[in-house]
Image (cartoon, helix red, strand yellow):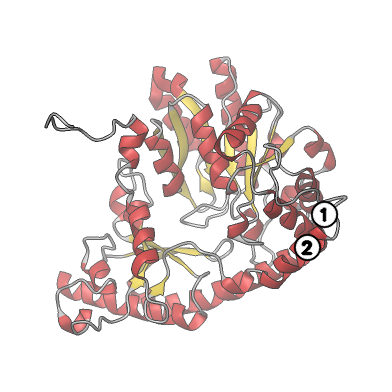
Amino acid sequence: MTSGRKISEVPLSSYGRLSSVLSPVGRMMAQFAADFRDGVDINLGVGYVSEEAIPYEEVAEAFAAIRRDPARYRVPLNYGGPAGSPNLIRSLRRFLLQNHIGELTSEILDRYRIIIGASGASSLLEGVAEVLPPGIVITSDPRYYIYCEILERHGYEVLAVPEDKEGISPEAVEAELARLGDRVGDVRFFYVVTVNNPTCRVLTTSRRAAIVAIAEKLSQQLGHKVPVIFDGAYELLIHEPGFPRPWSPLHFDRLGIVYEVGTLSKIVAPALRIGFMIGPPGPLMDALVQHTCDVGFSAPLFAQEIASYLLDHKGDKRLEEVRSVYRHRALVARQAIERHLGWALAEISGGEAGFYYFLTFKDVNTGEASPFFRFLTRSTGDPAIDGPEGEPLPRVFYLPGEHCVDPHGKLRELGQRQLRISYAYEDLSRIEEGLRLMGEAARYAAGLAS
């Protein structure tokens, strides 16, 4: 029997309390999963890869092949080791070298360790947040909103430094470090996305070297290593022919402070959840391996072995094919952007790598409270725009720029006129239609503002 005393909810940690409220992007993804109408609504927002770039038949072929070779691919449906499948690690090393990714060499990779995350690259990044003490993280603005929100829920302070066309500015980073004064000792690590999400600007080789040099200088000043985490999620998708291929930042690492995070989601399949980190042997890599063990023992071994087989037998061809898919999509999407939105835009970023364009409008507000957003989500209250009762017109999902910039930073006002679109998920005809509707929404918003 109960005494009638009111029982409160389960007490949560600080992280738990912050996690109990779904983030804006999480809310948008939940909405997409819950009520998206295939063939009606248009997804230009959620960053899914192109279905035409996922090798369904080859994945099935790979699983059959590993079952026929138990000597090499042992117990693929059982548990694996927390550092990752030795087969996959060897395959990654060969793939990186053979395809000249980052101009890496055997001599460089011999000095580093490769580990596999429990569930994609995001699990390794979350592991970094777990195993390092909270403090300040230096990153770029616009920022990778998903990881920055994770860091903030873990108690970190994210200091976002504006980027330009070559990526995060080293001079601006040094200025921010100087501004911190005595608090510079609270800097825990640098987090830099090499092909930035959301802008898809590619961090140049010289900028990579400069950021490593800044971190080395800070490490010497503080008397302990300050890691630089380079997130290369889209590094393999630099698809514009002739675009300068940046060098891996491992080339410039003299202190053992550079860590590169990569993924096979963009060139194989996201559902395999293969993320990896290349980093110097030491306590941080050891802690991340234990973190993988803590959260799931290992990444699913069958997925690792499938990925290993595909890299060995199809990897080089897959890389060419996937780059070709996104190059074509980038060109078609760019033409549609200019056709339907060119009149309203101040800047277009992206198109050389990854699968996003980041658009800056001259005057149109793009936030969730804006007429532009309400037009595209059919929530204006006007039946002529929203559609008749029970038969709403197509909605267009995009990522508002207000979620991509530091809410306390220098770009917060500019972010109100920005948005990110993806040219990966939808058919090209649907991308064209989505951008046409965006043009209508921009004219609607401009008419209300005039």
Q: Look at label 2 and name its amino acid.
A: Asp
Image coordinates for residue 316, horizontal then vertical, percent: 78, 62
On screen, 96 above or below 392?
above
Near-viewer residue (253 or 1): 1
Query: In the image, is 160 to the left or to the right of 2?
Result: right
Image coordinates for residue 244, horizontal then vertical, percent: 67, 57
Q: Look at label 1 and name its amino acid.
A: Gln
Residue farthest right in this picture = 71
Q: Residue at x 70, y 30 (%)?
A: 280
Query: In the image, is 137 to the left or to the right of 106?
Result: left
The disc at residue 157 is: none
Mark 2 is surrounded, within 10 Å at the Cα level, by few (under 14), some (14 to 19) or many (20 or more) other residues, namely: some
Near-viewer residue (30 or 364): 30
Residue carrying label 2: 316
Identify the secondary structure beneath mark 2: helix
Q: Can residue 58 be seen?
A: yes
Q: CA distance from mark 2 to mark 1?
A: 8 Å
Q: Residue at x 68, y 54 (%)?
A: 303
Identify the secondary structure beneath mark 1: helix
Q: Residue at x 55, y 17 (%)?
A: 221
Quadrant, the C terminus = bottom left
Q: Residue at x 28, y 82 (%)?
A: 393
Q: Earlier in the sequence, mark 2 or mark 1?
A: 1
The image quadrant that residue 245 belongs to is: bottom right
Image coordinates for residue 163, horizontal then vertical, percent: 46, 47
Q: Can residue 161 be seen?
A: no
The disc at residue 98 is: 1
Mark 1 is surrounded, within 10 Å at the Cα level, by few (under 14), some (14 to 19) or many (20 or more) other residues, namely: few
